[in-house]
Structure formats: C-alpha cells, structure tokens
Image: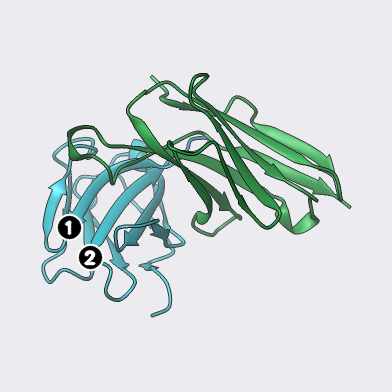
Chain colours: A cyan, B green
Amino acid sequence: GAGVSQTPSNKVTEKGKYVELRCDPISGHTALYWYRQSLGQGPEFLIYFQGTGAADDSGLPNDRFFAVRPEGSVSTLKIQRTERGDSAVYLCASSLGGEAFFGQGTRLTVV
Amino acid sequence: DQQVKQNSPSLSVQEGRISILNCDYTNSMFDYFLWYKKYPAEGPTFLISISSIKDKNEDGRFTVFLNKSAKHLSLHIVPSQPGDSAVYFCAARGNSGGSNYKLTFGKGTLLTVNP
C-alpha cells in the first residue's frame, strides 16, 4: 500500500484479556518501529525491527508485551493480561534508513 | 526525565503571521532532529529535519533553526495558514551505542492558526 496501515483503528478490551495489534509497513521498508502515545504525551519508543529480528526491544514496558515480524514485513504487537494503564494509541512506523513514516495508530482502551 | 522538551503546550497565531515553535533537548548525543505534524486521529507526519552539522534548514514555508550550544531548536512557519493547525512534535535521534534509529519525542505543541 501507499502508507503504513494499522489495524484495528480502535480496540476496546476488558482488563485481563489478550490483544493483538497489526502493522503493515510501507512495501520494501526494512525498518519497523512500534511507539506508544499516552494522553498528553509524545510517542514513546517500544521496539525496533530490522528485517525479521527485534534489534532493540528496550522500550517494552514489561514481559506482557511482545512483538513479532516473522517475514520481515507485517508486524504484530501482542499484549497479554491487559491492564487499564495499557490504554494508549499504539503507533507503528517504517523506514528505509531515513525518516520514519507513521501509521494512523490503534487506539487501545482497556476497561 | 524528559530529554526533549516542548515547554509550550499550545500556541495561537493569526493567519499570515509567523508561528514559532520551540524545543529544547538535554542529551548532547542527539545529532539529528525532526519535526512531525499530527492531525487528530492520524499518525504523525514528517515535516522537516536538521542534522547537527547545520544550523538552518528551509523547506518552503517551514524553517528549522538549531542552536547546538543552547541545545535548542525552533520551527518557523511563515506565513501561517489555518491548515497548519495541528499538534507539532519535536523529535531527536542520537548516534550513541548504535541507537541512531530511536526517536525521542517531546510532548507536542498544539498550534491554532486563526483565520
């Protein structure tokens, strides 16, 4: 596609449930990033993939968060045992070494 | 500890006037700076960037100035247009420990351009 696509746009889940957020990067972009934006804050780095491997996952808040990119294209961010504090907009971005292009984000609400 | 600070949560200007958005940073390892623009319900869109070897970069109505000694950068928009109304994020990228991919963002400044 023309840009970074994220699905779903909105996700409401109950506390304790498992969620998956999907990111389709720009075709050919080798680098993929996940960021999280909480209310009133700027985006905060979560994880960076170069190809299929997670080159830096230092921003993941705890072991309930995990992300994969098995074929070096689509990525899935997985959150186990969701908590209300996980509510935020989750942004995916991709790049080819230059500026990062962001998707529209997935707004996750944990109730 | 905020490494990138945008101290003005909001700014309001008249159409046709200059908008100046400010950003300060604390990490001296940052060597590349970017501005992103964000409309509601959309992701951030890249606007303009500047390398630490330069002190100015211009692209149409947008100019970014970098003062390394003061660890300060600013985005100038002139003339401002109502369509420029959005949240503007300052972001920085460093080159320490091979982390030249990770962006550190400020909290953003909401710019409103009044007709």
The reply to whether the C-beta atoms of the residues labelled 2 and 1 are less than 8 Å apart is: yes
Residue B9, image x, y percentages: 64, 31
> First in sequence: mark 2 or mark 1?
2
Q: Amino acid at mark 2?
A: Thr
Judge if badges 2 and 1 mark residues of a common chain. yes
Q: Nearer the viewer, residue A64 or A42?
A: A42
Residue B23, image x, y percentages: 56, 30
Q: Nearer the viewer, residue A45 or B23?
A: B23
For residue A103, above or below residue B20: below
Mark 2 neighbour class, 10 Å CA radius: few under 14, some 14 to 19, many 20 or more: some
Q: Residue at x 30, y 63 (%)?
A: A96
Name the residue furthest bottom: A1
Q: Which mark is residue A50?
A: 1
Q: Please give the chain letter of the residue carrying mark 2.
A: A
Q: Please give the chain letter of the residue carrying mark 1.
A: A
Q: Is residue B4 left or right of residue B27?
A: right
Q: Amino acid at mark 1?
A: Gln
Residue A111 shows in the view: no
Q: CA distance from mark 2 to mark 1?
A: 6 Å
Q: Is residue A71 left or right of residue B113?
A: left
Q: Which mark is residue A30?
A: 2
